[in-house]
Image: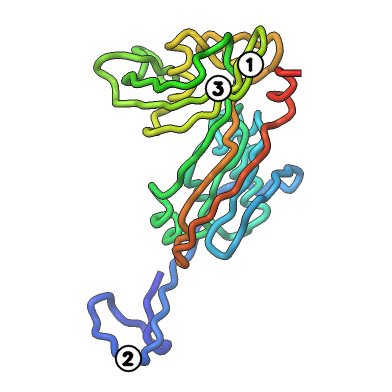
């Protein structure tokens, strides 16, 4: 890392003058193993960020059980030398749009600027629309599981039913807050767990993953300030629940 003025190193407290050329170099560090055998569609890209359409079943980050099959590994292959900086994170089995900053400055500016729209198939027939306002906490003695509990963090989910059949309802979902597993916990709490979400009471008889998809992502481009919206169609495995 270094700051130069007209090619000469300077400090952040040094005075600059009109006409000076200031360059900030912030080299990235990457430790993820590249994997070129993976394939993830790119729906938007510029010099500051890339938006992937992540398939269900692919983790965003490597873990003990997933060392080379993650979005991070694909990013390392596609952008050698860049650090993997996902701005919004999706569960492994959640499909859809995931924005990754290409540098630390863009990552900082993008934090808090992303608005997401999710789509989910849930068990049963829900109300036409509604709001779930219920605090979410970590389930005792579990690292992963969350639950609704009075001493939890504030969590608010808005939903609108788009269609339904005798088994499932398709919901359009907007979040006021971004708690871990918020959508999954909230719909389980009101008696309509996500299809395929056996962690929170859903059944996997028709789909082998939680039927949750991030289908729209809006954000402010870090440098230009332009408002950008990208979309991803509801994947076939969720659509087939309604055919």
Residue 139, image x and y in percent? 37, 14
Label 3 SS: strand
Q: Is residue 200 left or right of residue 235?
A: left
Whether tag 1 and tag 3 are in contact, CB under 8 A, the answer is yes
Q: Is residue 174 above or below residue 229?
A: above
Provide the residue designation for mark 3. 161
Provide the residue designation for mark 2. 18
Examine the image and state in which quarter residue 11 appears.
Answer: bottom left
Answer yes or no: is residue 30 visible.
Answer: no
- Name the mark nearer the viewer: 1 or 2: 1
In this view, the residue in front, 146 or 7, is: 146
Q: Is residue 152 left or right of residue 162?
A: left
Q: Is residue 32 above or below residue 145?
A: below
Q: Residues within 10 Å of mark 1 (few under 14, many from 20)?
A: some
Q: Which sits earlier in the primary sequence, circle 3 or circle 2?
A: 2
In this view, the residue in front, 78 or 117, is: 117
| Cα gap from disc 3 to disc 2, whole angstroms | 57 Å
| Cα gap from disc 1 to disc 2, whole angstroms | 63 Å
Q: Residue at x 66, y 50 (%)?
A: 43
Label 2 SS: loop
Label 1 SS: strand
Q: Which sits earlier in the primary sequence, circle 1 or circle 2?
A: 2
Q: Residue at x 62, y 38 (%)?
A: 70
Whether tag 3 and tag 2 are in contact, CB under 8 A, the answer is no
Q: Residue at x 66, y 7 (%)?
A: 166
Residue 170, image x and y in percent? 60, 21
Provide the residue designation for mark 1. 164
Answer yes or no: is residue 35 visible.
Answer: yes
Q: Residues within 10 Å of mark 2 (few under 14, many from 20)?
A: few
């Amino acid at each position: 890392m270094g700051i130069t003025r007209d090619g000469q190193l300077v400090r952040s407290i040094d005075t600059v003058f009109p006409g000076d050329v200031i360059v900030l170099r912030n080299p990235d560090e990457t430790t993820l193993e590249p994997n070129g055998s993976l394939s993830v569609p790119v729906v938007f890209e510029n010099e500051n960020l890339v938006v992937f359409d992540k398939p269900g079943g692919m983790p965003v980050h490597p873990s003990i059980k997933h060392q080379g099959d993650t979005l991070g590994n694909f990013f390392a292959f596609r952008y050698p030398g860049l650090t993997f900086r996902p701005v919004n994170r999706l569960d492994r089995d959640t499909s859809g749009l995931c924005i990754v900053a290409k540098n630390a400055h863009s990552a900082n500016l993008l934090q808090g600027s992303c608005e997401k729209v999710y789509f989910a198939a849930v068990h049963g027939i829900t109300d036409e629309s509604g709001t779930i306002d219920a605090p979410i906490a970590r389930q005792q003695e579990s690292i992963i599981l969350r639950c609704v509990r009075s001493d939890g963090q504030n969590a608010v989910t808005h939903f609108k039913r788009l269609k339904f059949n005798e088994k499932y309802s398709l919901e359009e979902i907007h979040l006021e807050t971004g708690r871990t597993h918020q959508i999954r916990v909230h719909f389980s709490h009101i008696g309509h767990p996500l299809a395929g979400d056996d962690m929170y009471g859903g059944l996997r008889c028709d789909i082998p993953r939680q039927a949750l998809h991030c289908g729209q992502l809006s954000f402010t481009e870090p440098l230009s300030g332009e408002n950008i919206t990208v979309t991803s169609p509801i994947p076939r495995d969720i659509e087939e629940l309604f055919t």
